[in-house]
Every structure is written in C-alpha cells, then in structure tokens.
Image (cartoon, grey):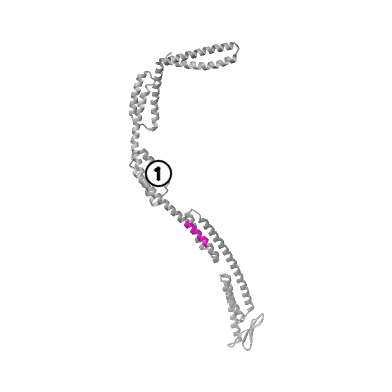
Amino acid sequence: MSSDPWGRVDETGTVYVRTADGEKVVGSWQAGTPEEALAYFERKYEGLVVEIGLLERRVRTTDLSAKDAMTAIDHLRTQVEEHHAVGDLDALRARLDKLVATVESRREERKAAKAKQTDEARKAKEDLVTEAEQLAQSDQWRAAGERLRALVDTWKGLPRLDRKSDDELWHRFSHARSAFSKRRKAHFASLDAQREEARKTKERLVAEAEALSKSTDWGPTAARYRELMADWKAAGRAQRESEDDLWNRFRGAQDVFFAARAEVFAERDAEQVENLKLKEELADEAEKLVPVTDLKAARAAFRSINERWEAVGHVPRDARAKVEGRMHAVERALQEAEEAEWRRTNPEARARAAGLTGQLQAAVDKLREQIDAARAAGNNAKADKLARELEGRQALLDQALKGLEEFGG
C-alpha cells in the first residue's frame, strides 16, 4: 500500500483521492507499482491545474465570451468531479467557483457596457436624424448636401440598435435625405428653366444690339443700348456655356456703335471748339458797341454781327451759356437805348408826364399848407396824419420828376 497527502493506493490497486467529503475512488491501477499509480494520477491533476490556469488567464486577458468561458468551466468541473486525478480537488473547485463569479461579473460589466453603448448609439442616431431633418429644409444646396453625405458615413460607423428602433430611425433619416434631394432637384430644374429662358431673352437682345451697331442715329440708339443693358441685367444668367459667348457678342456690338459715335463726336467737338473761338470774337466785337452813343449805327452793326453769329455752328455745351449771355447783354443794352430814345421823342408821353408832375406838385403844396394850419391850431394829431400822407405824395412826385427828366427837362 502506498499513499501521499492527497491520495493512496490499496492492496487491490484501487486509487483513492482525499476530499473534504472523504475519500473518492480515482481508478484502478494494475500495470505497475503503487507509486507509479499515484504519480500518474498526480500528473492528471497537474494537467487540470494547468488547464484551469490557462482558462483563468483567457478570462482575464482576452474578450472570451461568457458563454464560451462557462462551457470551458463546466468541462473542467466535470473532470474535477469525476475524480480522475490525485491532488487538492477542493482547491480546484474553489478556483472554478471563483472563475464563475469572475465570468458572471464580466458578463454584467459587458452587459452594462453594451447597454451604455446602445444608449449612446441611439442618442447619436437620434441626433443625426434631427440634424438631417433640419438640413432637409436648407437652401444651402452644396453645404447641406456635403453634410448629409458626412452624416451617412457617421451613421454607418455606429452600432446597430434593436431592429425596430434602428429601422424607425433609419426611415426618418432616409426620408430627410430624400426630401432634400427632391427639393434640390426641383430647385435646379427650375434654375435650368430660368437659365434657358434667360438664354432666349439674351439671344433676342444680342440680335437687336448687333442690328443697331451700324446706326448713326446717335442719341436714340445710345438710349436704346442703355435700355438693352437694363433688360440684360434683368434677364438673369443663362447657362454657363452660353452666358460668356452671348455677353461677348452683346458687348462687342455696343463697342462697335460707341466707337463709331466717339469718332464722330471727336470730330464734332473739334469743330465746336473752333466755332467757340469765332463766337467769342463776335461777342468781343459786339461788346464794343456799349455804351451806345449812336443808336442807329449801333443797331446796324449789331445786326451784321448777329448774322455772322447765326452762320457759325454749335459750340461746346458747357461754354454755350456764357458766350450767348455776352451777346444777350449787348442786345439788352441796345433795347434800353431804344426805349430811352422813344421816351425822349414822344410828345404825348412828355405831356402826360408834365401834367402828372404838376398835379402832384399842387397836391404836395396843398398838404404842406394844411399841415401848417393844423399845427397853428394846435391839432397835432391831424398834422401828423397829413404829414404821413405828404410822405407818400412826395415820393410819387420825386418819381414823376425823374421820369420827366428823361424827356429832356
């Protein structure tokens, strides 16, 4: 008979292992010595120790699932319970129990982590859906479109939720993208229609601009070109491939017209500058007639000057008022001289002026006598009233006397 602290072999070759519940039969050994039997079953025990140690390490250091870990534990526990090894089997049971607790703890941790991950994924997807639905109403077509594409990539990187929740959120997300795409498509279809209409309008404007480019009706044509430019701006932009070509044709037609007009105007301006010099010389000649000493000679001279003036063409617009003003001043001086001559040579007018002057002088004399009488009588109020009336009559008399002087005395 042979034994060690954890087992023994009896005389029949039966091998026992000692446990807290008493001895358990390990097996029968007939092929060698009892020592060899114990050594064999002790090696089996060491094998279990190694396997449990490896499983402990896998649970601790890898992402071994709880299910696989429990399967491995159950397999090892069966081997321990079958008592086919000699050693501290109770210690192995304790290690397996502890390992079960560890696996259960890990299972709960992973369950909580998964629940947290799911909550975070749900929140993230809800946020994506909310943003997508807001973007669906945007008119910033390029920026919103790029952002929606980025949201899809973000969505793909998030964990799936339960099927019902995931499908509902995806349906809202997809609907928002579709709504945006539909609005964008309608917008650009409308824009294309507007650009096609703009192209047709601008082709008509180009045709008219090109037809006007040879016109020499400078004023009305220039005004029409301004109207065409306003119509061009109001028409909006055509398609890019048409816009530049149409604009070049439109601008080119205007350039032809305005270049021709500028050339004609330059020649006209040069002629008008020469005309201005001639009219300034005529104005100098006319101004020498003032002051008028010989009305008849001055009138004849001015008539000759004016005939030569009328024969001269247009002058620059900014100089016209000044040079014409000089001639008008001479003309007014001649008119005033004629009026003065007429007054001097009109007997009836002189007689009327003399009569009026006599009447006013008599009235003034009478008022003075009345004032003296009133003051002598002590009636100062009446005297003051008559004095005020005298001032008015005296002013009229002074004016009449001045007019009479113009008739020569």
Indicate whether residue 341 is drawn in magenta: no
What residue is pinned by disc 1?
Answer: 229
SS majority, magenta: helix
Say which residue appears at 40% left-offset and 27% top-offset. Answer: 325
> Is there any visible trace of residue 111 in the rendered image?
yes
Magenta segment boundaries in residue numbering:
170-182
In terms of secondary structure, where does tag 1 sit?
helix
Amino acid, disc 1: Met
Which residue is outermost to the right? 21
Q: Position of residue 341 (x, y in %)?
A: 39, 18
Q: Position of residue 235 (x, y in %)?
A: 42, 47
Q: Is 286 situated above or below 139?
A: above
Q: Quadrant of residue 388?
A: top right
Count residues near mark 1 (Cα–Cα under 10 Å), then give few for <14, some for 14-19, many for 20+.
Answer: some
Q: Nearer the viewer, residue 145 or 228?
A: 228
Q: Position of residue 241 (x, y in %)?
A: 38, 52
Indicate whether residue 173 is drawn in magenta: yes
**The N terminus lies in quadrant:** bottom right
Q: Nearer the viewer, residue 220 or 262?
A: 220
